[in-house]
Amino acid sequence: MIILPIEQDNRTTIDAFIVRQWFSLQMVVHGEVIDMSAVDGWYAFDYDDIVGLITYRIVHQEMEILSLDSMQENKGVGSALLGQAIAKAKIYGCSRIWLITTNDNLSALLFYQKRGFEIVKIHYNAVDEAKKLKPSIPLFGNNGIPIHDEIELEMVI
């Protein structure tokens, strides 16, 4: 597995991957519509396939992870990509790395907490509000759990 940065020459391939995973290049999080075709990140590449992707942005000395996808769970792809992001945040002098997930995403909650992230806020009904901006957000998520809330996790660095 090779980890490479998102660059202009691979942007079309990365954007297509994002659409396959998220159904759109628009992500709605904490009441904001984010153009995923304009964010930074890295992708994991193995045997001519993208096997993982992490995207982020840095605002006010904080890194916000926008997405993390692994096509090969429990093989270290997500951990390697997250490690790349943590290293970058330290280089940029960020005070924290944070992210939002939804109340149905139990695997993300497990993944991040095992790697030192802590739940710091629950934004009740935030996904219900996000559905007004992006109606394609599903009503039900993983394991048939209704999606309503955003859960904020952080790692102080």
Image: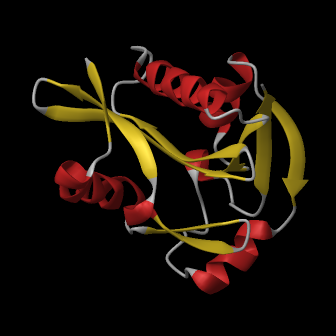
Q: Residue at x 24, y 55 (%)?
A: 8
- Quick one: 98 or 38, which is closer to the camera? 38
Return the residue found at the far bottom: 132
Q: Position of residue 143 (x, y in %)?
A: 59, 45
| 41 relative to 36, above or below | above
- Quick one: 12 or 26, which is closer to the camera? 12
Q: Is residue 118 left or right of residue 24?
A: right
- Quadrant where the N terminus lies? top left
- Quadrant where the C terminus lies? top right
Q: Position of residue 38 (x, y in %)?
A: 41, 63
Q: Residue at x 89, y 48 (%)?
A: 121
Return the residue found at the far top: 75
Q: Is residue 31 left or right of residue 53?
A: right
Q: Residue at x 72, y 73 (%)?
A: 31
- Quick one: 76 or 139, which is closer to the camera? 76
- Quick one: 37 or 19, which is closer to the camera? 37
| 114 relative to 30, above or below | above
Q: Position of residue 107 (x, y in %)?
A: 61, 32
